[in-house]
Image: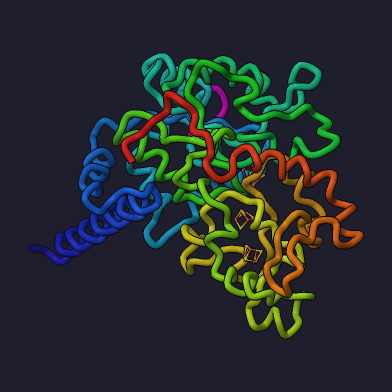
Amino acid sequence: MSRQDAGNTIDAQVSRRSFIKGCSIAAAALGLSETMVPKLVEAAASPQRPPVIWLHFQECTGCTESLLRGSHPDIGRLILDIISLDYHETVMAAAGHQAEEAMQASIDKNKGKFICVVEGAIPTKDGGIYCQIGGRTAMDILADVGPKAAAIIAIGTCASYGGIQAARPNPTGAVGVRDLITGTPIINIPGCPPNPVSFLGTVLHFLTFKRLPRTDQLGRPLFAYGRKNHDQCERRPHFDEGRFVEQFGDEAHRQGYCLYKVGCKGPQTYANCPVARFNDVGVWPVGVGHGCIGCTEPDFWDTMTPFYERLPGVNIPGGGKGIVTGADSIGKKILGVTAAAVGIHAAVGIGKKVIKGNKSEE
Ligand code: FSX
Ligand code: SF4
Ligand code: F3S
């Protein structure tokens, strides 16, 4: 064996190991047992890779960036290995008419079989003129492509619920995919940006079980959004014992105490951040000393602000004082906007209702 061949073999082994590791991470995120990993690997390694048309609308491209910059294992590479990315404006080599033709050719060839990923909100005001690609509005493109897909994955809070574009006063009438498309299975992977593991788990679930994972009433997969960050947070013992950071940089902050009083929205945020974590070093916002701003929740730019003031309506066990709703002027000030979020979560809280017809094997 030449040195070159030996190198290639090692590369292939590393790549295979990384491939299996990625599938194991996805299986764990999906709540599947180790015994299911070979089934996921088999589905992921199938030569019939599902075609994916990835549409970009109103957004910052952070969803794609966080996905493709992920590594260890290289989740971005794994995703690119298991799907056939036929159209993606950020990473494709083609441009202009050539790119539009590639998209059309893939849609014609794979009608009813491809996955449509939507990144970004869709402006609806004034005929949707505020986002146009190749001379067509985002509304037109989605109305054309969406119904021809086997399933739509709305990646990011923008595509799921409108995101920052839909923040008051929502000048372009931005909405999420589910506001415009019916009749095609749609799943939301919110987060600004979302965790790549949640996206990978959803894709692998679809490939393995031929359907999308079970969701909550907001269209989010339960495997990733079934629990609040607060209930999985490593600072939770401090919350339970009443040990709070009062000010960024104080001794309590240095000690890693709970960030609720400096604005953490973890008690009202459904996500898997404390478990899935981000980037090579396995961090998440609260882990590095910043409160959760609730980025997986609909309208969080309106309902979770001010970001650095405490969330009202939260039981604080410490000190025997119980409920602190409206306990100070800050709480009263934000009670109105937060009430909407609290209302939403009352509907999807403990014993969340699962959308029918979207059952899965897990
Ligand atoms: Fe939105 Fe994605 Fe926030 Fe950005 O593109 S969810 S603005 S991080 O990245 O759509
Ligand atoms: Fe963690 Fe925030 Fe909950 Fe405190 S309030 S336990 S920092 S999620
Ligand atoms: Fe977003 Fe909160 Fe996670 S801000 S990234 S849901 S910790």
Residue 65 visible somewhere in the drawing: no
Residue 94 falls within the magenta-colored stretch: yes
- Position of residue 116 in the picture relative to residue 265 (left or right): left
Residue 46 visible somewhere in the drawing: yes
- Look at the image and tell me in which quarter the C terminus lies: top left
Q: In which quarter of the view is residue 21 placed? A: bottom left
Expressed as whole percent of the image width and height from the top left, the position of residue 244 reads: 71, 74
- Camera-side residue: 284 or 67? 284
Please tell me which residue is depicted at 57% across the width and 63% down the height of the picture: 284
Expressed as whole percent of the image width and height from the top left, the position of residue 243 reads: 68, 77
Residue at the farthest front position: 320
Expressed as whole percent of the image width and height from the top left, the position of residue 309 reads: 81, 61
Look at the image and name its color scheme. rainbow
Q: What stretch is highlighted in magenta?
A: 93-97
Taking 79 as reference, is 234 above or below it?
A: below
- Camera-side residue: 223 or 282? 223
Residue at the farthest left position: 1
Taking 229 as reference, is 114 above or below it?
A: above
Please tell me which residue is depicted at 24% across the width and 60% down the height of the picture: 11
- Position of residue 305 in the picture relative to residue 195 (left or right): right
- Position of residue 30 in the picture relative to residue 193 (left or right): left
- Camera-side residue: 33 or 86? 33
Please tell me which residue is depicted at 76% across the width and 16% down the height of the picture: 127
Q: In which quarter of the image is ligand 1?
A: top right
Q: Is the magenta stretch mostly helix, strand or loop?
A: loop
- Look at the image and tell me in which quarter the N terminus lies: bottom left
Residue 347 falls within the magenta-colored stretch: no
Residue at the farthest bottom position: 251
Looking at the rendered structure, the number of numbered marks drawn on it comes to 0
Please tell me which residue is depicted at 80% across the width and 56% down the height of the picture: 325
Q: In which quarter of the view is residue 318 placed? A: bottom right
